[in-house]
Image (tube, rainbow, N blue to C red):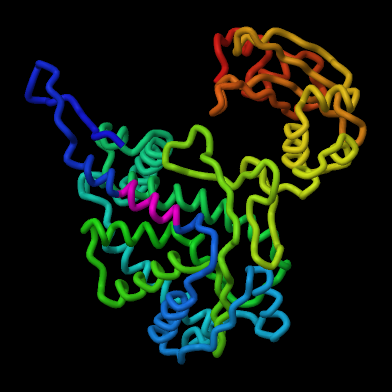
Amino acid sequence: MSAVRIPSTSSSHGTFIEDPHSELIRSVVSERDTYLGHGMRAGPSDRHSAESAVAQLYRHADLPVPRFVWELSPAAAAARIAEDNLAYAVTFAVEGPTCASARIATLLSISRSRMDACIRLPVSERPPPRWPMTIRSQALRAAQGRTAAAVRNQPPEMSVRAGIGLNPIIRSTVWDSLRTSLFDGVAAAIRTLMPPLVGGIPWYGQQEAHRIAYYDIYRRLGLATFQPQDNDLLDALVALTESTGWWWAFDDVCVMSERPTALHSEPIPDRVHGERRLHHHDEPALQFADGSSAYVLNGTIVPDWVVLDPSVERITVERNVEIRRSAIERIGWDNYIDAAGLALVDNSDDPGNEGCILQLFATPAGWGGEGRVLLAVNGSRERDGQRRRYGLYVPGEFSSALDAAGWTYGLSGENYAQLRRRT
């Protein structure tokens, strides 16, 4: 990442100086990428480091060190929890949490609150103290919303150049980015392999890196100073992020899960904070040693048939719109339209995408309802330089391709026709 350069306010000759926060932001991004690597790592867990870290958490919660049981996947761990009758409701008694899960969860929650208090909003980003409290709160929320939108949609160096404070930049660059890639991405795929009910509180190990990295980066870069106890707890969580997958704490036993044996991902298009999504074109994007696996295409979790054997017949009866779309894109929209015999309702030049055509088709009877499919060409190019054709499900009331295209943007067909280029 190049240094952020801003025009000098003391010179009229276009002299550039490096913003004092540039090097810090580069360090933040580097640390973030290190944690992303931990979260995406496949291969055997470092069992010794993981057990030592969990034992440290038990001791801080005034609990005896548990017996450790290792399983090959979170799904296998859930089965062991059920088989050994470990699943029970987490209880928070009047005098405080009693079971191991609740005690550790409470301990970590209190610690995060203390650390949050050390990461305070800079005075320069607060509303004037002379404003009434209600107006200050409203102004603060509005300002935070605008700032969050800005830093989410531009690289961190641009946010620095725009004068945005470090706190929202770090939040978006670290917490939000890693949560998207790991917790909302990888962990969500793993959850599809789990039984509906699993007792206790799962901790996500490597996929919990978003919150661990957030606090650790503030500490490592000298941006916040935490209490000794919070540093000890954070050290244990860092070790778990680096060494293992999911785990469950019970009173006398801790059930630990191995990491995946394979994990395939790709950058999320048009994202600016290093976000990634699961993807593999020919095999499971996520696999464990016991054979449990998840097929994922461009971040969409799909049944195995979508990757291994997509067909018009299966697509026609599929009720999930995203799975159906992924399966059609797998065989190609042109091939699907021909094989399924979709009737063309209307076509038109795309005014928002010069040189491209909009096509409106009737949907197959098996899709349900009286909808239409609008086939269009993406206004931006994919990583390989090609423009992807894609289909959008639109209400059946449309008989005009222009009207259907305008509807997807909240416009009338007449207004959409005035666009010069769609993005």
| Quarter where residue 223 is shown | bottom left
Residue under the point 45% across and 78% down: 48
The N terminus lies in quadrant: top left
Residue 395: tell me if it is visible. yes
Span shown in magenta: 28-37
Residue 130: tell me if it is visible. no
| Quarter where residue 246 is shown | bottom right
Residue 214 lies in the magenta-colored region: no
Q: Nearer the viewer, residue 408 or 340?
A: 340
Query: 28 left or right of 292?
Result: left
| Quarter where residue 26 is shown | top left
46 shown above or below 27 = below
Q: Nearer the viewer, residue 49 or 62?
A: 49
305 shown above or below 146 = below
The C terminus lies in quadrant: top right
Q: Position of residue 31 (x, y in %)?
A: 34, 53
Q: Nearer the viewer, residue 18 or 229?
A: 18
Majority secondary structure in the magenta region: helix
Furthest residue toward left: 10
Query: 187 left or right of 374?
Result: left
323 shown above or below 57 = above
Q: Position of residue 72 (x, y in %)?
A: 63, 71
Q: Position of residue 344 (x, y in %)?
A: 85, 16
Tag count = 0
Q: Nearer the viewer, residue 66 or 101?
A: 66
Q: Position of residue 395 (x, y in %)?
A: 78, 27
Residue under the point 80% across and 46% down: 305
Residue 29 lies in the magenta-colored region: yes
Residue under the point 79% across and 22% down: 334
